[in-house]
Amino acid sequence: MFSIEEVHQTALAVNKLRNELGKEHNKFLPTEHILKYLLTKAYEDLAFAQRVILEKKNAKELFEYMLQEVKKALNGQNGWLDNQVVYEMAVTYFTSDEITIEKPEVKEVQIKMAPPLKPTKEVVNEEMNLVIDYNHKKGKKVVENQLSFDLM
């Protein structure tokens, strides 16, 4: 049997997590899946639900922490992690008091720009010829009046 207080704490945790569903948090993480996993855990685990409702724990920091941990796990490269590993990262954020979120150092930079120059027809033609030559060397098909983007 659960006490009224325990039911109330579980409801608060579930509502806190449910309110984050549908919000855009982080484009690099499957935030909806993570939040749904945490919702289920909060329903099933009172001790976890009590950690979720702590004021210092929030979705913004959760996903900052997770992105930091994913980058560490993948050595800063693209890759895959097992679902359970990712879910455990999320649980760790809520259950640990020793979480450190590394904030990148922000440097103040002042940028001065000259007014844009209007390229002459000769400059544009020369640049287009360089692109065409590059594409020919790469073995790419060149189509007149179309630009090629080599994103990889």
Image (tube, rainbow, N blue to C red):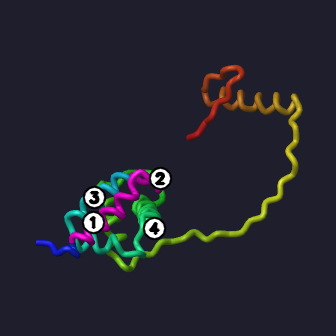
Q: Residue at x 45, y 67 (%)?
A: 61
Foreground: 51 or 148?
Answer: 51
Contact? badges 2 and 4 (CB < 8 Å): no
Question: Which callout, 1 or 2, points to the residue nearer the camera?
Answer: 1
Q: Which mark is residue 84?
A: 3
Specify few, some or many for label 2: CA neighbours under 10 Å numbering under 14, 14-19, or 20 or more. Answer: few
Q: Give the crowd class for mark 1: few <14, some 14-19, many >=20 residues within 10 Å.
A: some
The CA span between labels 2 and 3 is 22 Å
Element type at mark 2: loop
Does residue 30 show up magenta in the picture? yes
Residue 151, compared with residue 60, is above or below; it is above
The location of residue 4, given as percent across then percent down, is 19, 73
148 vs 39, nearest the viewer: 39
Quadrant occupied by the C terminus: top right
Q: Is residue 77 left or right of residue 145?
A: left
Looking at numbered disc 4 in the image, what kind of residue is underneath it?
Glu
Secondary structure, mark 4, is helix
Reading the image, the residue beneath label 1 is 11
Q: Are marks 1 and 2 in contact (CB under 8 Å)?
A: no
> Secondary structure beneath disc 1?
helix
Which of discs 1 and 3 lies nearer the camera? The answer is 1
Q: Nearer the viewer, mark 3 or mark 4?
A: 4
On residue 61, the disc is: 4
Q: Which residue is mark 2?
A: 24
Which mark sits nearer the N-terminus, 2 or 3?
2
- Check residue 46 for magenta coloring: no
